[in-house]
Image (cartoon, helix red, strand yellow):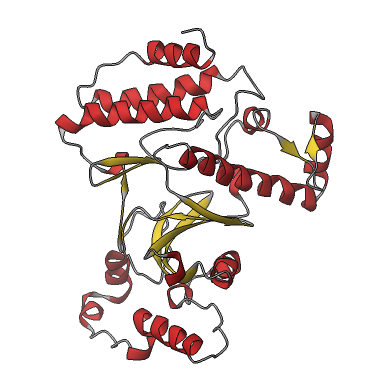
Amino acid sequence: MDIHTEYDPDDAETFDEKTRLALGSTALHKPKKKASYESNADVQRWLKEQALEDGGVKPEFNPTFLASLRDAPWIVSSLVQFYDQDLITDVLHVVKSGKEATVYCCAADSSTGIDYLAAKVYRPRMFRSLKNDAIYRQSRMQYDRDGRVVRGGGRHHSTGKSSERGRAARVNSWIEYEFQTQSLLYDNGADVPKPVAQIGNAVLMEYIGDVGQPALTLREVTLERAEAQPLFECILRNVELSLAHNRIHGDLSEYNILYWQGEVTMIDFAQAVDPRYNPDIFSLLLRDIERVCSYFADYGVAADAQELANEIWLRFQGVL
């Protein structure tokens, strides 16, 4: 993947194939233009640090990686406050790109004590791909366009659809809720990335993987048969731990569970629900567990999803 082009999951052709067809085979053997020393990311980072040490003004946030991207202004505006707050210094590469958001690997500011952070930037059209939006809205606290808690559904319904301000408030409440959910779970020992900050349409969190080699999802890896059962049990513990703190993931599957060095990490909590606001959501818990059971069945893990969901739900209600 060209580091100056954002990954498009719907593009099935490779860059080399497109280039060969358009320019002919001889074009591929044309010598590459040598990158200037000054444009090197490490050099740019060092220059910024020197400017600050010498008492200069902090340089403008202008990551070289984003320079040729079509939506670079949107990404920069989404991340600049993390830069201004000395949380990140640069954007290094795309981790993954989906319909609702794109995740970037960022160089962390030295003051954070870590090397890298992951920045999840939501797109304005994020709600187009959210399924069954109504059930999720019914299962969490709602806010109107002025940020006040909505006690009934009518007021939120009318303001949310009647103005851009209402829609923006609704989008922001979803993103804030994801950050709050991730913070809640992390603070209580769940296997989720450590949340760092949330501003507007961007969430900053722990980066899982190495630079240039982000952790893959379970969908993208082949497990050793011997590690399947322990990982399955670990995920179920996380599901029950989440429920004990009033959260159901709501969209859990092999697509949003990371695997890195023998451990799993759950991600993507935009559709998490709170059973206190809608007790009739057992079906979402069951669906999460069914998907996990289905994935691990291919590794010989035998489990009854319905029975597991019933037991976890009854323990949550204090019956077992």
Q: Position of residue 196 (x, y in %)?
A: 51, 55
In-image side of 146 versus 108 (left or right): right
Which image quarter: residue 160? top right
Which image quarter: residue 131? top right
For the N terminus, which image quadrant? bottom left
Q: Is residue 296 above or below residue 188?
A: above
Q: Nearer the viewer, residue 298 or 107?
A: 107
Q: Which residue extends farthest top? A: 319
How many numbered badges does the structure rendering display?
0
Q: Nearer the viewer, residue 213 or 20?
A: 213
Q: Position of residue 65 (x, y in %)?
A: 43, 74
| Residue at point 48%, 56% (across, down) | 102
Which image quarter: residue 71? bottom right
In-image side of 167 versus 178 (left or right): right
Q: Is residue 27 above or below residue 308?
A: below
Q: Position of residue 241 (x, y in %)?
A: 45, 28
In-image side of 127 versus 7 (left or right): right
Residue 297 in sight from this viewpoint = yes
Q: Is residue 27 above or below residue 303?
A: below
| Residue at point 42%, 37% (across, down) | 189
Q: Position of residue 134 (x, y in %)?
A: 66, 30
Residue 36 in sight from this viewpoint = no
| Residue at point 48%, 30% (across, down) | 242
